[in-house]
């Protein structure tokens, strides 16, 4: 299986972006980081004062991201000829193009407050239950559906003149190739995809009053959508195929889970923690609706039955807050502080609704503790440990729900993504669930992206061959359950605290 084909994965996350180069040699994938850069939102004077009552709006600086993408291509070209490139990003966010293909405005950040109250407005037009019956998607105010509705209710000129809506990975693909298409996995995050029809939902779009013509053709992962625009070939000195890969980063990460058994739980761990299992078809029933579980697309148009949990966002926000105070801790230092803090003294539910939006995280954690009658963390270590313990217990809640509804009992939990660097969280997860936890690879999203490209471009014969490559190429760690004392009582406390606070999801 020796090959000198070079595949590029442009992987944009909520905190950072990176471009990874992958080369298949002798049954292994050699991964090289070509370029890394910060992402994150920027603040602009608000365009929606009548809706969010804020002075600023949170948007993505996609013009800079585009320049970083071109820098990545130029850097990768120095390593060798590029065969193909795939883009993956977070879900739900989008861009609007005018009839000439121009970007109308900066894509908004999903944590922008313009979606406050939009779910209730949507249910006035189409019932909550009916929306779930159509889409099988978890209700989160950040979903594309509610972002668009906020624009529609405000009478947005951008929406009125829009000719195309492109999800953010599709925007980059469009700038690369000139082809305006919508990749399946990212479309499923919008809560406007009809899981039964296999297309955009005409019922939801009509009920919300959105213009039907802006929603482009949906293509499956692994679609070769075209080569670079001639102007880019001239500018960058490279020409290669652009492949849709699995454009939603969670889908790409799950495609890199090196599991050998059919039935397993996966956790894509980073800013968000997405916990799920793979199923043959969407699971849409009374119980999945009750527990607000989601069905999103993956490799080969497969289904990921899962739920979003707030994830390491809380740790990131705490770190930023302490940095403003002059305490510039690394993530490693924060984890070390947590390791020596008291065990199960305080449990923070990561899905408390106030944690969703940015800023003031320390104060929000203290407020949560006071509402739930728990000791307020006094040190950085106590704060981070309380968050990590709460994450492990929230994982337990979701996994129990997934298994009860699917009828599948799993023995192993696979965690992939950047969150696997936090080994304390992995051990807490093993202890809280009394199950084996297998972690790695760290760069799962880029690896899954590359494996899908390689299959599309003929570098590997099939996905099963790709899994063998992953297992041969990357370090995998195993965490066995250790001291489980106190976790059942802590779990009962988390469930009791749910009655005292409002959860985001």
Image: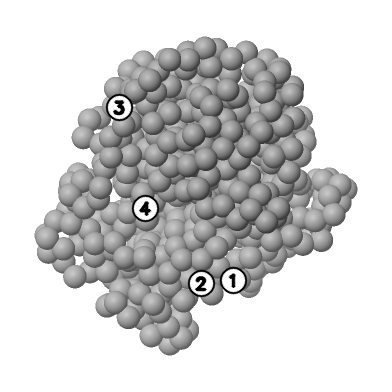
- Rendered position, 505 above or below 216: above
Q: CA distance from mark 4 to mark 1?
A: 23 Å
Question: For the point 52% across and 12% down, which residue is it?
Answer: 489
- Rendered position, 303 above or below 43: above
Question: If you read the primary sequence from the N terminus, does the residue marked by circle 4 or circle 1 appear first?
Answer: 1
The nearer-to-camera label among 2 and 4 is 4
Tell me residue 201's x, y (percent). Answer: 57, 39
Badges 2 and 3: C-beta atoms under 8 Å apart? no
Q: In what quadrant of the picture does the N terminus appear? A: bottom left
Tell me residue 249's x, y (percent). Answer: 45, 49
Q: Residues within 10 Å of mark 1 (few under 14, many from 20)?
A: few
Say the numbered circle drawn on residue 480: 3
Question: If you read the primary sequence from the N terminus, does the residue marked by circle 3 or circle 4 appear first?
Answer: 4
Q: Is residue 214 left or right of residue 446?
A: right
Task: Look at mark 4 in the image and give the residue it sits on.
Answer: 443
Q: Is label 2 in a helix, a strand or a loop? A: helix
The nearer-to-camera label among 4 and 1 is 4
Task: Look at mark 1 in the image and give the residue it sits on.
Answer: 64
Q: Looking at the image, can residue 471 be seen?
A: yes
Q: Residues within 10 Å of mark 2 (few under 14, many from 20)?
A: many
Which one is in front, 318 or 80?
Answer: 318
Question: For the point 28% across and 54% down, which residue is it?
Answer: 451
Q: CA distance from mark 3 to mark 4?
A: 22 Å
- Rendered position, 158 above or below 128: below
Q: CA distance from mark 2 to mark 1?
A: 6 Å
Q: In what quadrant of the picture does the C terminus appear? A: top right
């Amino acid at each position: 299986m020796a090959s000198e084909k070079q595949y590029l994965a442009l992987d944009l996350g909520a905190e950072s972006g990176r471009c990874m180069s992958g080369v298949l040699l002798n049954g292994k994938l050699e991964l090289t980081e070509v370029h890394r850069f910060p992402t994150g939102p920027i603040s602009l004077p608000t365009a929606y004062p009548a809706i969010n009552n804020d002075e600023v709006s949170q948007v993505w600086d996609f013009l800079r991201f585009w320049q970083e993408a071109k820098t990545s291509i130029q850097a990768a070209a120095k390593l060798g000829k590029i065969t193909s490139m795939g883009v993956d990003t977070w879900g739900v966010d989008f861009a609007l193009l005018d009839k000439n293909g121009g970007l109308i405005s900066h894509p908004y950040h999903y944590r922008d407050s313009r979606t406050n109250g939009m779910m209730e407005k949507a249910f006035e037009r189409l019932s909550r239950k009916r929306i779930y019956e159509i889409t099988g998607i978890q209700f989160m105010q950040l979903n594309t559906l509610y972002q668009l509705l906020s624009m529609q209710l405000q009478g947005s000129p951008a929406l009125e003149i829009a000719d195309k809506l492109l999800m953010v990975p599709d925007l980059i693909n469009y700038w690369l190739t000139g082809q305006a298409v919508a990749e399946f996995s990212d479309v499923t995050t919008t809560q406007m995809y009809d899981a039964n029809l296999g297309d955009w939902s005409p019922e939801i779009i009509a009920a919300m009053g959105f213009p039907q013509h802006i929603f482009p053709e949906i293509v499956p992962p692994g679609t070769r959508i075209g080569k670079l625009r001639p102007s880019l070939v001239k500018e960058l000195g490279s020409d290669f195929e652009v492949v849709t890969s699995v454009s939603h980063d969670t889908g790409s990460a799950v495609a890199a889970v090196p599991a050998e058994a059919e039935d397993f739980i996966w956790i894509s761990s980073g800013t968000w923690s997405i916990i799920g299992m793979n199923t043959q078809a969407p699971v849409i029933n009374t119980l999945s609706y009750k527990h607000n579980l989601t069905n999103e697309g993956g490799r080969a148009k497969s289904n990921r039955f899962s739920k979003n949990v707030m994830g390491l966002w809380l740790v990131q926000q705490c770190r930023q807050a302490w940095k403003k105070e002059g305490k510039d801790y690394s993530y490693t230092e924060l984890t070390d502080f947590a390791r020596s803090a008291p065990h199960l003294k305080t449990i923070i539910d990561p899905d408390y609704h106030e944690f969703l939006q940015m800023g003031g995280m320390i104060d929000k954690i203290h407020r949560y503790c006071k509402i739930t009658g728990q000791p307020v963390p006094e040190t950085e270590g106590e704060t981070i440990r309380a968050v990590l313990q709460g994450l492990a217990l929230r994982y337990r809640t979701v996994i129990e729900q997934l298994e009860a509804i699917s009828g599948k009992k799993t023995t192993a939990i696979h965690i992939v993504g950047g969150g696997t660097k936090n080994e304390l969280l992995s051990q807490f997860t093993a202890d809280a669930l009394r199950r084996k936890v297998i972690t790695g690879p760290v760069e799962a999203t880029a690896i899954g992206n590359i494996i899908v490209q390689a299959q599309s471009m003929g570098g590997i014969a099939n996905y099963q061959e790709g899994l063998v490559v992953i297992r041969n190429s990357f370090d995998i760690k195993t965490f066995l359950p250790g001291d489980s004392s106190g976790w059942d009582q802590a779990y009962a406390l988390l469930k009791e605290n749910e009655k005292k606070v409002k959860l985001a999801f």
